[in-house]
Image (spheres, rainbow, N blue to C red):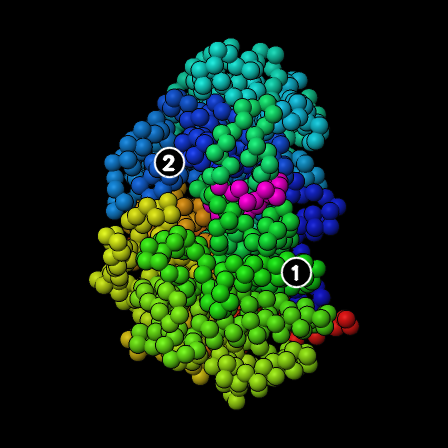
Amino acid sequence: MVLEGNQEVMSAEELRLKEDRERSKYWKKWGPYTAERQWATVREDYSADGNAWADFTYDMAQKRTYRWGEDGIAGVCDTHGKMHIAFAFWNEKDDHLKERLFGLSNPQGVHGESIKEAHFHLDNTPTHSYMKYLYKLPQKAFPYEDIIKENARRNKTEREYNLLDTGIFNDGKYWDCFIETAKDGDNPDELLFRVTCYNRGPDYAKLHILPHVWFRNTWAWGRDDYKPNVTQIGPLQSEIDHRDIGKRYFQCSPSPNSCGGEDDIEPEFLFTDNDSNYVDLWGAKQNKTPFVKDAFHKRVIKGDKKAVNPHKTGTKSAAWYAFNAGRGVAPGDCAVVRFRISTKRNDGYLDEEEFDEIMDQRLADADDFYFKINPMPMADDLRNIQRQAFAGMMWCKQHYHFIWDQWANGDPAMPPPPPSRKAVRNSQWKHMHLDDILSMPDSWEYPFFAAWDSAFHCIPLAQIDPEFAKKQLDLFTREWYMHPNGQLPAYEWNFGDVNPPVHAWATFRTFKIERKMYGREDLDFLERVFQKLLLNFTWWCNRKDPEGKDVFEGGFLGLDNIGLFNRSDPLPTGGTLEQADATGWMAFYALSMLNIALELAKHRRIYEDIASKFFEHFILISDAMQYRKGSDAKSLWNDEDGFYYDAISFGGSWSHQMHVRSLVGLIPLYATLTLEPQVINRFPNFKKRMDWFIKNRHDVAERNMASMSRKGKDSRMLLALCNEDRLRCILKRMLDETEFLSDHGIRSLSKVHKDHPVSMDVNGQHYQVSYVPGDSDSGLFGGNSNWRGPVWIAVNFLLIESLLRFYMFYGNTFKVECPTGSGDYMHLGHVAEEIQHRLTHLMAADSQGKRAIHDGNEMLDHDPHWKDYLWFYEFFDGDSGRGLGASHQTGWTGLMAKMIHDTGVNCRLPQTPRTPTAAAAHYFDDTFARQRRQSMSRNTRPGGPARSLTRTRSIGARSDWSEKTGANGSANGDGDDDDTFSNGAPTPSRTWSIYKEDPDAGLPKPEDDPDDPINRYVSDQLARIKSNESHEYAEELSAQNDGADDEKA
């Protein structure tokens, strides 16, 4: 959305969002809400010991019915997960259909659970009017056993053995299966599906494609015996009947014969029931139903016609397209399947031309929507990364169903669960009754919500769908999620675990992003969530600061293995762990609540008192963390090292600091807030209370606020845990490339611990923390994450925001050496941007086309069928930037989209030295960067069997800016001829600075351009970039005196 005065530039997708928001059309009823993995989740675990991985395995999933959800490939379902559409494939080599994604359980993986597939989330709009998914299916037998055995052989110091490592893609013998979904322009219940599978190999190959339509089993548990059905009513059509969804029609189109024959390929409809195969699973004498869940495997692969229902009806159906005539599909050719789920019966053939036009129009709508989200000029590669980040955020939306009472006590028609099961986990969360669409951290590895992950998700989500972002934040504070004592649920493995308190920060950021990008100010949302967070803040104070010292515990706080000990367990040394990060988080929480209270006080004066309360909370937390009373008392700050450390308190003045330089000591930087003078003066009661506190608690206030006698830039006041001296000490270490600063962001543990590990022997047990830049070398917290060296984007994002807040106060006068020892001094705005650029370089291609996340993999970097498709990893190697952990973690790695939005316009290529020339291209300097952009190649539409659908399209590659800024596409129109390398390869997009008397030369003139509001917006933003202004950050990061009308209390 671009707002130019009162003029809105609204795309077709934004109109759909508006209709959904106003509830005139339910555009989000159908979406990618089917899980990618339902097996081995806590919800499906009915074991006595809580071993979810063993209780419901991948192999069982073929035959065993799920109780709480469904899974599939590129699955689509309704918002309550009752009816599902997904896809299965068979290459005539595997022993079962590929109808769900394969991966290893936590005990099987070298570093915990891990998906072993190659699939990509390529595109998706907020209303899911257009979705695109790529699954790469090997033409050889899938190496299930090889993957299991080789990972079992390896130890924790070795790398995970993934599908690409087997070499199965090396000779190109695989199918690229592009799965597209679109909605009709006027009717959100009309769903169109198109599957295009390209034979990338050198030989002919055979393929079977089976679109599935089925119902989640709600009838077998003894609570509701209603059974929906799908029944064939014509050669190419089945009727779907569900009392809650109504009648729908599964309409298939004959496929072009890509096997050399003249006749089109028509599907065979198959039917069975979504019921468990008791005979195969548990050795029962007979099944409860004659047709069971795995019937299609037996029919397609084993040729068993008796396995499916001859009456052509059931609760699970598939349309079986067989591209296996003769030698199969030729090399380079494709197999195509089209079908739709419609509210209207159609006894004729689908109009394929109309079908493809709708698909193309929805894609054009998606292009338009995402371009207008960020119309600034930038490299096509960055647009592609941002587009896929947003797509991944959408594909990670899943239906989450859980009712504690039914889960804990079992169902009437099933054997009762073992009595011990209730005590295994979540016994204190009896109130939970969840049936919602939630944003998951990862579509396969973490198919369950995690509270602090969800908060970070909402930042990029707010850019494209603020309603959904607000819904996520609101849900966690509702009475069926939040515990009656005020605690927010962490994640399903242990709802009672403690995640960092970032909910208030995310709430305020979401509110501000919506106001800035869309011109909407949702005060009801802000006030509703704030009121509930008051309960949560009180819970933190009561439960995590039991002695009332304003120094907090917290347990692992999402940082898994970062400490010397497991921070969730009692200390082996005895005593209590006083956590620098927990206390820093609480100070950050207090400031976030203060920010919200000041925003609300502009409309209701009663919030001034609450703002005063959080102001005092922060000051007291800050003072307790850093300045203890009594000559023997120790703070968490270490003057000698210039860093914050955790400490073990043994009571009284006895404590022991653990000198581990980690993210724990950087988190106190988060607790930073600038107070605008106009805001303070606007609230006399708040100002009066603050002045009283400063006067009567002068010693405390002076220590914890930037000097009262000195105001910052634009007369701002600064609240921060770190004064100027401590800030310099911390930044000296944080920006040291031999400690925290890597080529790809801030490490979670200082590299100094590579040669100088920290260890302690307790009761004969040796504990040690050393720098481990890659995967974890231990099994702590499942072993599938590592906070002892890698780069994590979410915590980097908060560091960046903190630096920008400090910059808002100190302005250009406060400069630090970045990197430490380089001789290059920057103000904190530049430092923040430098870190953003380094993070962006994780995924951006360098001048040789290499991406750090690929770790030098030639196929991923250079193969035209791989190089533009991206995995969004959970964390990244602290030395190389190699992608690690979950690979579809667009949850918080999706923050990449926000960083590209903010700084992509002037992001230099990876591994480009930061010279004075490059430095001049940054946001806060007098000159600014422009992009010289080469469009990604677009292949023409081929004819033949694929008809109009087989064109290759570069997601997000738009050259509108290049076309408008110069006759030959160059940004300054100078006609230089360096558009190719000496080998003839296209020059990658790059950033360059303009040193001209007229820096606006070459910019499009708004009055000459049909996209007037867009170009005016771009021109204004570029003018801001070169003007050295900081108010842009204040607009997003703090409460502003924006002229809102006061409501008299």
- Residue 1032 in the image: state x and y as whole percent: 56, 72
- Residue 968 in the image: state x and y as whole percent: 47, 61
- Between discs 2 and 1, the one toward the N terminus: 2
* Residue sticking out furthest to the left: 755
Residue closer to the observer: 408 or 101: 408
Asked if residue 435 lies in the magenta stretch, the reply is yes
Nearest to viewer (mark 2 / mark 1): 1
Q: Quadrant of residue 301?
A: top left
Asked if residue 41 lies in the magenta stretch, the reply is no
The CA span between labels 2 and 1 is 42 Å
- Residue 417 in the image: state x and y as whole percent: 52, 29
The residue located at (44%, 36%) in the rendering is 50
Q: Label 2: how many residues lie within 10 Å, few (<14), some (14-19) or many (20+)?
A: many
* Residue sticking out furthest to the bottom: 709
Q: Is residue 54 visible?
A: yes
Residue annotated with mark 2: 104
Q: Is residue 319 visible?
A: no
Residue annotated with mark 1: 531
On residue 917, the disc is none
Residue closer to the observer: 220 or 950: 220
Q: Label 1: how many residues lie within 10 Å, few (<14), some (14-19) or many (20+)?
A: few
Q: Quadrant of residue 302?
A: top left
Q: Is residue 748 left or right of residue 475?
A: left
